[in-house]
């Protein structure tokens, strides 16, 4: 149970970072933390005590294995996050080029 | 003397190791159906090899050494080939992306039907795409007010 | 067999566009319009010939609990037609409009990816697959919002991307918990398992999904990103985002999950009512104060999404009919109004209502179609907006929710208020704009797409005539009203 609570705490750290930080790069990192905690949730749910990795090798018997599906899901979601992070970094570079600052409170040409 | 890039030691090590890294990436991608890894992991390793060259030798050398446009074309064509293979699965197998080739023997390199082909194509796609993404970020120079 | 092609065709078009088009965008235009046209033809075919059946397509020939399945029922066919129609018209509109910004094939490749993502979300019957397609659609949406390369657009895209990734993380956590609880990712089997479990679990899962998808649908506590993103994007993209993206990613997924998977417990209906009413009122008041025409339309989108949510929240036949029809009609008239703003921006170089004036001489087609669109969104008979709002209000009265009905009527009166302002200052103002003040002429493609949607504003009212309605809309309503009948139809269709 503690693991899940800690994992949720990690998620909240990400939310806190997105809501309160002013630096663009720190905000991007915070969204990354949120994504990682979601991935960690998936992996934790698949974990079984005493089970081995779900890969069959030559000359081995089939033992109790952890659930392989969430690992595939996590791989997919990591790829998605990589894309999103690259996109965000590119946008941050462009924002710096236009506004000469990384401070989100100074980037306010849109209002209302 | 080219001032871009890193010191002589890093350059020499990179010159030797880059082909080894690419080879390792190809190995991982080819053995995706037998061992941990697969097309995605192999592709990431291949893109890291290119990235090493960019870091050690600088952007100018890399743009001469590699044809970035060609990398983009390889990426798009391998993605289209994946889709074409999926449609072939519809024609010959049970559905989209179906494994329609013979599965072969367990633990042989040529086995598991279409999975190794997908792994190779995904390796090509991911390797090129990741490098192009990082390259696009790297060649953006901050401070130049340019409008394309 | 048709089902995977809704994803394959636009995806293949996106990759081929990057391959074969050089510096020019001619091939990109031809390919993307061809791809979108074929998707539309397929969707119409599915809608009219196989409407009452449910088709399940299993990827790569696996059987249902192990496979990623694609599900085609009346609701998904309906959404596919809406999405492909708006996408096709937007593509026709963008040909000259995008050349006026930046000429590049990248726009069309990204547009095709956007369509891929939306079609995938609509067609899929698998929870994680839905997440992946949603991210594809959102990723291209971030890129397209910043397509004009101005400072404001980068700012809006950054905000949009941050909010999008926060909501995606929430949805991913929801999917993780759902998977651990039901050991399945196929929506039908999830629904089957959840039926036997206590309803409190559904509340927790529903809370996570409501926060996540509510952010995508821009319900009022989660709406902050929408006015920036939708008003900064190029006009055809604004119309895609406001017209179909928030509906397919937000409203459609909420309906699919809450009605078909969770079985629509009464609590969720109440929540949708509350958030919907809040969206209508708050966004209407915010819209009245705007002088930027695109921002006004963006706020109005939030408010109209509120109408749709209220309709689904009531949950009786009339309410769902009104919501479904409002979804269709809002897609049409909001896209039309965004095209109008795009045409005005291209011709006059401004979006500020105070610098616009009487445009009837200079831009006759634009000002006439904007009048049609405004009348439709205000809810004037015989345009489609009138009937959808009427049905929603009638449903509220029938369910004896008089206070909500009062608020919704108030919301539609506020809609009239800000669209009267839109017309009065934007298109029929005091300052007469002559023909020679127009910087760039409006091309035939833009005029055609505006006129086509204006005609549709009137024509779609025909769908409500008894006799046609039973054939066209009732199957869609049955899918939603049947709630977990979805399980039976999917599992027997394996």
Image (cartoon, helix red, strand yellow):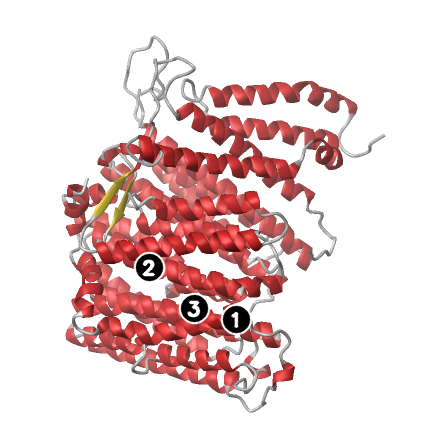
Q: Is residue C142 visible?
A: no
Q: Dot 3 falls on which chain?
A: C
Q: In the orientation shown, which residue stands out farthest toward the top?
A: A59
Residue C310 quadrant: bottom left
Residues A22 and B44: in front is B44
Which numbered disc, 1 or 3, marks the residue that appears first in the sequence? 3
Residue C275 locus on image (x, y percent): 32, 66
Q: Are marks 1 and 3 on the same chain?
A: yes
The residue that appears at 14% across and 43% down in the rendered structure is C196
Q: Residue at x 72, y 29 (%)?
A: B56
Residue C30: x and y, percent?
A: 51, 54
Q: Looking at the figure, which quarter contains the N terminus of chain C?
A: top left
Q: Which residue is mark 1?
A: C444
The circle drawn on residue A83 is none
Q: Quadrant of residue C308?
A: bottom left
| Direction from residue B142 to residue C135 in the image, left or right | left
Q: In this rendering, do the residues under marks 1 and 2 share a single chain?
A: yes
**In this rendering, the label closer to the viewer, 1 or 3:** 1
Decide: is C90 above or below C281: above
Residue bearing the label numbered 2: C81
Q: Secondary structure at mark 2?
A: helix
Q: Earlier in the sequence, mark 1 or mark 2?
A: 2
Q: Is residue C442 above or below residue A23?
A: below
The quarter of the picture where the C terminus of chain C appears is top left
In the drawing, does residue C220 fall left or right of residue B146?
left
Dot 1: chain letter:
C
In contact (CB < 8 Å): disc 1 and disc 3: no
């Amino acid at each position: 149970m503690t693991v899940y609570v800690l994992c949720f705490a990690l998620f909240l750290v990400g939310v806190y970072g997105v809501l309160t930080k002013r630096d663009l790069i720190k905000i991007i990192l915070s969204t990354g933390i949120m994504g990682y905690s979601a991935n960690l949730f998936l992996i934790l749910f698949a974990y079984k005590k005493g089970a081995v990795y779900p890969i069959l090798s030559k000359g081995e018997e089939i033992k109790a294995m952890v659930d392989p599906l969430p690992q595939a899901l996590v791989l997919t979601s990591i790829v998605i996050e990589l894309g999103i992070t690259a996109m965000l970094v590119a946008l941050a570079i462009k924002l710096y080029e236009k506004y000469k600052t990384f401070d989100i409170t100074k980037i306010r040409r849109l209002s209302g | 003397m080219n001032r871009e890039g890193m010191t002589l030691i890093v350059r020499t090590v990179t010159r030797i190791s880059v082909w080894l890294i690419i080879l390792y990436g190809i190995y991982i991608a080819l053995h995706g159906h037998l061992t941990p890894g697969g097309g995605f992991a192999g592709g990431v390793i291949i893109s890291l090899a290119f990235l090493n060259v960019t870091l050690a030798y600088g952007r100018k050398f890399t743009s001469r050494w590699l044809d970035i446009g060609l990398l983009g074309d390889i990426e798009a064509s391998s993605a289209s080939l994946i889709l074409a293979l999926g449609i072939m699965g519809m024609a010959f197998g049970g559905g989209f992306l179906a494994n329609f080739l013979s599965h072969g023997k367990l633990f042989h390199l040529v086995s598991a039907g279409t999975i190794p082909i997908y792994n190779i194509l995904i390796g090509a796609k991911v390797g090129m795409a990741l490098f192009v993404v990082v390259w696009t970020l790297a060649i953006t120079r901050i401070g130049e007010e340019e409008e394309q | 067999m048709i089902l995977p092609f809704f994803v394959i065709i636009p995806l293949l078009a996106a990759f081929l566009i990057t391959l074969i088009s050089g510096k020019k965008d001619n091939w990109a235009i031809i390919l993307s319009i061809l791809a979108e046209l074929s998707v539309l033809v397929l969707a119409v075919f599915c809608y009219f010939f196989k409407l009452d059946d449910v088709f399940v397509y299993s990827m790569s020939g696996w059987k249902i609990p192990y496979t990623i399945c694609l599900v085609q029922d009346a609701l998904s066919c309906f959404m596919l037609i809406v999405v492909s129609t708006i996408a096709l018209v937007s593509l026709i509109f963008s040909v000259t409009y995008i050349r006026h910004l930046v000429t590049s094939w990248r726009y069309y490749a990204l547009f095709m990816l956007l369509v891929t993502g939306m079609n995938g979300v609509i067609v899929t019957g698998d929870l994680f697959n839905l997440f992946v397609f949603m991210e594809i659609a959102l990723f291209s949406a971030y890129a397209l919002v910043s397509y004009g390369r101005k400072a404001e657009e980068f700012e809006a895209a950054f905000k949009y991307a941050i909010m999008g990734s926060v909501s995606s993380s929430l949805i991913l956590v929801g999917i993780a918990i759902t998977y651990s609880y039901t050991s399945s990712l196929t929506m039908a089997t999830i629904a089957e398992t959840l039926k036997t479990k206590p309803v409190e679990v559904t509340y927790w899962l529903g809370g996570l999904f409501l926060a996540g998808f509510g952010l995508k649908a821009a319900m009022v506590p989660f709406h902050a990103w929408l006015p920036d993103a939708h008003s900064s994007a190029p006009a055809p993209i604004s119309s895609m985002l406001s017209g179909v993206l928030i509906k397919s990613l937000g409203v459609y997924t909420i309906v699919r999950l809450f009605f078909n998977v969770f079985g629509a417990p009464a609590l969720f209906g109440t929540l949708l009512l509350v958030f919907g009413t809040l969206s209508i009122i708050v966004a209407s008041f915010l819209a009245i104060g705007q002088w930027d025409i695109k921002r006004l339309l963006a706020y109005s989108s939030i408010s109209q999404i509120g109408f749709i949510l209220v309709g689904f929240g009531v949950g009786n036949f009339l309410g769902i009919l009104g919501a479904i029809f409002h979804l269709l009609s809002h897609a049409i008239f909001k896209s039309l109004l965004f095209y109008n703003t795009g045409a005005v921006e291209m011709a006059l170089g401004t979006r500020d209502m105070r610098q616009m004036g009487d445009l009837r001489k200079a831009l006759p087609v634009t000002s006439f179609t904007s009048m049609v669109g405004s009348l439709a969104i205000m809810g004037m008979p015989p345009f489609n907006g009138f009937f959808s709002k009427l049905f929603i209000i009638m449903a509220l009265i029938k369910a004896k929710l008089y206070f909500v009905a009062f608020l919704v009527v108030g919301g539609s009166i506020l809609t009239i208020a800000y669209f009267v302002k839109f017309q009065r200052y934007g298109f029929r103002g005091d300052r007469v704009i002559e023909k020679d003040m127009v910087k760039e002429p409006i091309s035939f493609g833009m005029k055609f797409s505006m006129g086509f949607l204006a005609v549709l504003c009137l024509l779609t009212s025909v769908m409500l005539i008894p006799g046609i309605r039973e054939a066209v809309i009732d199957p869609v309503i049955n899918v939603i009203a049947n709630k977990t009948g979805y399980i039976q139809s999917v599992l027997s269709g394996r």
